Amino acid sequence: MIGVDGQHLSTLAPQSGHVSNFCHPVGTVIEPVDWHCLQSDPCATPALIHVRRPAWTRLELVAMVPPSLNRGACATLPSFMVPRRVSRRVTIGAMTQEERRKRPEHHVVHDYANLVSSGLLITDAKSNDELLKIAPVNSHVWHAFYMNCRKMYEFFHYMKSKDYLRAQQFVNPGVTFTFQHWTDDVQKFMNTHMLHVGGGRVTNKKVSTGADDKSYLAEFQGMWERMLKNLQHKHKEIFREEIEHRLDSEFRHCGTLGREFISK
């Protein structure tokens, strides 16, 4: 058998007709594989051979600063044009957006990512100071955080429903979620002041200062961790894939979104 370099490859394993690597994996195996013995020695240790098309493709994009462009030359360019070494991983799923939309886990991860993203912006002092400079964007981000907290409270705290997604349908039996900071009273307050133009606003005496925002964010992060640690086996890989999908998007600033809590 002749290899890509024109050399005779007597140790090439038998092929299935759909192979992307010719002799051995050069990195993470991204296609379905089977074990095959080499033609030259059927008794030797089997080799991994790709047998079907990739389930997903991962591209490693690395931009290098040209050697000819030294620090002095860069100093004359606007900051956003200065070349710099970048290593960014881009994951391109094999499924279409329509297929992904049909996954319940997709929507759960999306809403939680919005909660974390807005929560980090308003609880970080530096980010909050910047938001105050571009009012009313700061108000919009606050609304986004509280609205997503409200949604995720229903997701974690309420019982199963045929019309709404609930944490109970993804976790093992007996797992519960108990809140100490975002309570039913807070939920009711947000319903009146955020979700509805509630008449109770005119008689309300409570002033929302944002003092509890860090506690709210930490509490929902704790609930998310608890859920991921107790996922039913059939949901684990899907949640992991959806979290990776979000981290490869505009939510890449949200840390890990808890993917390390999903057991094998």
Image (cartoon, rainbow, N blue to C red):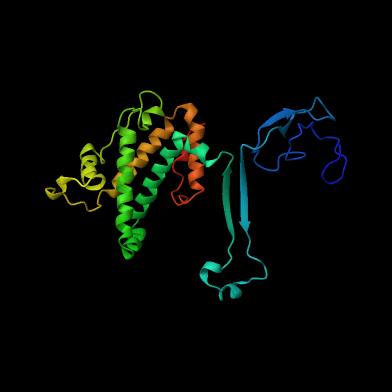
The image quadrant where one finds the N terminus is top right
Across and down, in percent, residue 47 comes to: 74, 32
Q: Is residue 142 left or right of residue 21?
A: left
Can you tell which quarter of the image residue 217 is in?
A: top left
Residue nearest the viewer, comparing 196 with 150: 196
Q: Is residue 39 left or right of residue 125?
A: right
Q: Residue furthest top?
A: 173
Residue nearest the viewer, comparing 135 with 215: 135
Q: Is residue 35 left or right of residue 137?
A: right
Name the residue located 88 percent from the left edge and 40 percent from the top edge. Answer: 8
Name the residue located 43 percent from the left edge and 32 percent from the top edge. Answer: 229
Name the residue located 38 percent from the left edge and 34 percent from the top edge. Answer: 226
Q: Residue furthest left?
A: 203
Q: Is residue 246 left or right of residue 82?
A: left
Question: Measured along the vertical axis of the image, is residue 235 above or below residue 75?
Answer: above
Question: Measured along the vertical axis of the image, is residue 217 above or below residue 34?
Answer: below
Confirm whether residue 183 shows in the render.
Answer: yes
Name the residue located 48 percent from the left edge and 50 percent from the top edge. Answer: 252
Question: Measured along the vertical axis of the image, is residue 217 above or below residue 77?
Answer: above
Across and down, in percent, residue 197 comes to: 21, 47
Across and down, in percent, residue 116 comes to: 38, 47
Total of numbered circles in the picture?
A: 0
Across and down, in percent, residue 112 comes to: 39, 42
Confirm whether residue 241 shows in the render.
Answer: no
